[in-house]
C-alpha cells in the first residue's frame, strides 16, 4: 500500500510539474511553432513575388539588364491613395481621376522601359506589372504581420494569420499566373465576356482610341445589334462608361446587355451561366456607376449575363471549363434579345480583359487552341 501510495504521489507530482511547465512555457512554444510555419509561408510568398518580377524583366530583356531590373524593382512600391469618402458626394469622380492618373503613370513607365515595343506589347506589360505588384504587396503585408508576431509574441495574431494563409497563398499564386499570362499575351478567365462579344464581330469595327474600346453593328437572329468590347488583343479592360457616354452622343440605344465573369460560390460549377438585371461589371465601380447614371437618366433597361468562376480562375489563363461556357452565354444573349421589342436598339457590351482576344470572331478559334495547349500543359 505504501509503495502504491508512493507511485501515485510521484505520478501526481510529475503531472503537476508538466502542468506548470505547460502553463509557463506552452504559449511560447506554440508561438514559436506558429512563427516557424509562417516563416516558411512568407518565404514562399516572397519567392512568388520575385519570380513574377523576374518573369517580366526577362521578357523585356533576355540578359536582364541592371537598369531595367532596378527600374522594375522600384516600381513595385507604386501605390494609390484612395480619395476621402467621409463626404460621399462626388467621390466617384475623385476615384475616376485617381485611377486615370494611375493608368497614365503605368503607361508612362512602360514606355520608358520598352519604348520600341508595339502598343499591344506595352498594354500586356502594363497589366503584367499590375499582377507583379499584387504579389509583391501580398508578400510585404504577410512579412509585416509576421515581424509583429515575432516582436511581441502575439499568439492570437499568429493563429488568425495561419487561418488566412491558404487563401492568401492561392491569390498570390493566381496573380503570378496572371503576370505570366499578360506578359505572354495569353487570354485569362476574366476575358470570357470580351470573347463572347468577339464571337459576334464579323465586319469592320469602329475604334474609340481614348476609351480603348471598339464597336460594330452586327446581325443577330435577323436583328441589328451594336456589339462593343475592349480593343484587343493587347491586355486592356478599356473604359466602358466613357465609351458609352461618347457612343450615345451619335447613337440612340433602348436596351443595354452586359456580359462578364462573376465570382462563383464554393460548390458552384465553373462556367455556369446566370441571367439577371443591372450592369455585369467588376472593378472599383467607376465605369459601372457611369453606365448606371446614363441608364437611369435615359430610362434604359439593363440586362446582365454572368459567367461564373473563382477569383483564381478569373486571373489565371483561361481554363477549358470557362471557354466551354461560350455557347451557353451566346444562347443567353439571344434569349435576352428576343425578349426585347423588335424596334428596340440594343447595345451588347462584352466586359473583361481582352488580353489575347482580337476584335473578330476568328479569335475564338485562336483562343480555343491556346486553352487546349494550356490544359495539356497543366495535366502534364
Image (cartoon, rainbow, N blue to C red):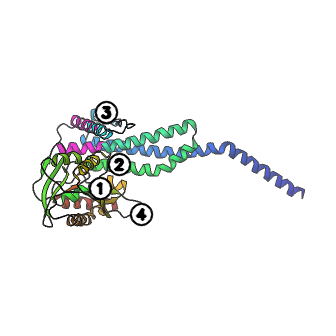
Q: CA distance from mark 2 to mark 3?
A: 21 Å
Pointers 2 and 4 in contact (CB under 8 A)? no
Is residue 235 in view from this perspective?
no
In the displayed image of the protein, which residue is found farthest to the left? 204
- What residue do we see at 12% from left, 66% from top? 222
- The residue beneath circle 3 is 70
Mark 4 or mark 3: name the one nearer the start of the chain: 3
Residue 278's disc is 1
**From mark 1 to mark 4, how far is it between C-alphas?**
25 Å
Query: Residue 320 location, x and y as percent?
Result: 29, 63
Tag shown at residue 267: 4
> From the viewer's perspective, is 354 left or right of 162?
left
Q: Position of residue 349 (x, y in %)?
A: 22, 55
Give the number of the mark in front: 3 or 1.
Answer: 1
Say if the magenta span includes residue 338.
no
Mark 3 and mark 1 lie on one chain; the one further toward the N terminus is 3
Question: Which mark is first along the chain, 2 or 1?
Answer: 2
Amino acid at each position: 500500500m505504501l509503495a502504491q501510495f508512493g507511485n501515485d504521489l510521484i505520478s501526481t507530482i510529475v503531472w503537476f510539474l508538466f502542468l506548470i511547465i505547460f502553463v509557463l512555457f506552452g504559449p511560447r512554444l506554440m508561438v514559436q511553432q506558429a512563427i516557424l510555419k509562417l516563416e516558411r509561408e512568407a518565404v514562399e510568398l516572397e519567392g512568388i513575388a520575385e519570380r513574377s518580377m523576374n518573369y517580366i524583366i526577362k521578357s523585356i530583356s533576355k540578359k536582364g539588364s541592371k537598369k531595367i531590373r532596378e527600374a522594375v524593382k522600384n516600381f513595385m512600391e507604386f501605390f494609390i491613395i484612395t480619395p476621402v469618402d467621409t463626404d460621399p458626394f462626388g467621390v466617384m469622380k475623385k476615384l475616376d481621376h485617381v485611377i486615370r492618373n494611375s493608368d497614365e503613370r503605368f503607361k508612362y513607365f512602360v514606355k520608358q522601359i520598352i519604348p520600341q515595343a508595339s502598343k499591344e506589347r506595352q498594354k500586356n506589360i502594363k497589366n503584367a506589372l499590375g499582377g507583379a505588384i499584387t504579389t509583391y504587396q501580398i508578400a510585404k503585408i504577410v512579412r509585416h504581420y509576421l515581424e509583429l508576431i515575432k516582436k511581441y509574441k502575439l499568439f492570437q495574431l499568429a493563429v488568425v494569420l495561419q487561418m488566412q494563409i491558404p487563401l492568401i497563398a492561392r491569390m498570390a499564386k493566381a496573380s503570378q499566373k496572371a503576370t505570366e499570362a499578360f506578359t505572354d499575351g495569353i487570354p485569362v478567365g476574366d476575358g470570357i465576356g470580351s470573347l463572347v462579344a468577339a464571337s459576334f464581330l464579323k465586319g469592320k469595327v469602329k475604334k474609340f482610341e481614348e476609351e480603348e474600346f471598339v464597336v460594330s453593328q452586327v446581325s443577330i437572329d435577323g436583328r441589328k445589334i451594336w456589339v462593343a468590347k475592349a480593343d484587343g488583343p493587347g491586355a486592356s479592360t478599356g473604359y466602358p462608361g466613357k465609351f458609352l457616354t461618347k457612343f450615345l452622343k451619335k447613337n440612340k440605344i433602348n436596351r443595354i446587355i452586359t456580359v462578364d465573369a462573376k465570382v462563383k460560390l464554393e460548390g458552384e460549377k465553373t462556367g455556369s451561366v446566370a441571367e439577371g438585371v443591372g450592369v455585369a461589371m467588376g472593378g472599383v465601380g467607376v465605369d459601372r456607376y457611369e453606365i448606371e447614371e446614363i441608364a437611369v437618366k435615359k430610362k434604359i433597361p439593363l440586362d446582365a449575363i454572368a459567367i461564373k468562376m473563382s477569383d483564381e480562375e478569373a486571373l489565371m489563363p483561361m481554363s477549358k471549363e470557362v471557354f466551354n461556357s461560350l455557347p451557353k452565354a451566346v444562347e443567353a444573349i439571344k434569349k435576352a434579345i428576343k425578349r426585347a421589342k423588335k424596334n428596340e436598339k440594343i447595345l451588347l457590351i462584352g466586359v473583361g480583359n481582352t488580353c489575347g482576344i482580337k476584335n473578330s470572331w476568328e479569335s475564338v478559334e485562336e483562343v480555343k487552341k491556346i486553352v487546349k495547349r494550356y490544359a495539356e500543359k497543366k495535366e502534364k
